[in-house]
Amino acid sequence: MTAASQYIPPDDVEMLSVVFGELLRDCHSRRDSPEAEDLAARLVAIYQSGVRDTMLLRKLTIPFLRQG
């Protein structure tokens, strides 16, 4: 993966931050928890696969939450 493909525009960083916060609330987790770190990695991976829709990002990440 090149540096250009890893670039996340500022508006998308904000969008991911909002989705991340919502998911943390849904799973009653703190930002500094190991679960939150795993969640953030999964969310970014889904984003990097091409998903930009916030509802779809949440929907695709929710099964990850339920696996733990």
Image (spheres, rainbow, N blue to C red):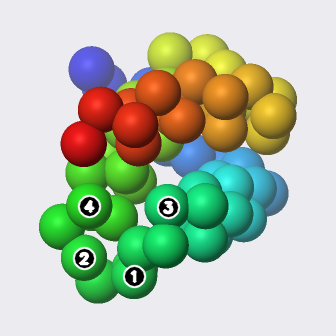
Query: The C terminus is located in which quarter?
Result: top left
- In this rendering, the answer to whether 24 lies above or below 47 is below
Dot placed on the residue nearer the N-terminal end, 4 or 3: 3
Amino acid type, label 4: Glu
**Residue located beneath label 4 in the image:** 35
- In this rendering, the answer to whether 59 lies above or below 65 is above
Q: Which residue is pictured at 37% across the width and 50% down the height?
A: 39
Amino acid type, label 2: Ser
Residue 4 shows up from this direction: no
Are discs 4 and 3 less than 8 Å apart at CB?
yes
The Cα atoms of the two marked residues, 4 and 3, are separated by 9 Å
Are discs 3 and 1 less than 8 Å apart at CB?
no
Are discs 4 and 2 less than 8 Å apart at CB?
yes
Q: Position of residue 43 (x, y in %)?
A: 48, 41
**Residue located beneath label 1 in the image:** 30
**Residue located beneath label 2 in the image:** 33
**Residue located beneath label 3 in the image:** 27
Circle 3 crowding by C-alpha within 10 Å: few under 14, some 14–19, many from 20: few
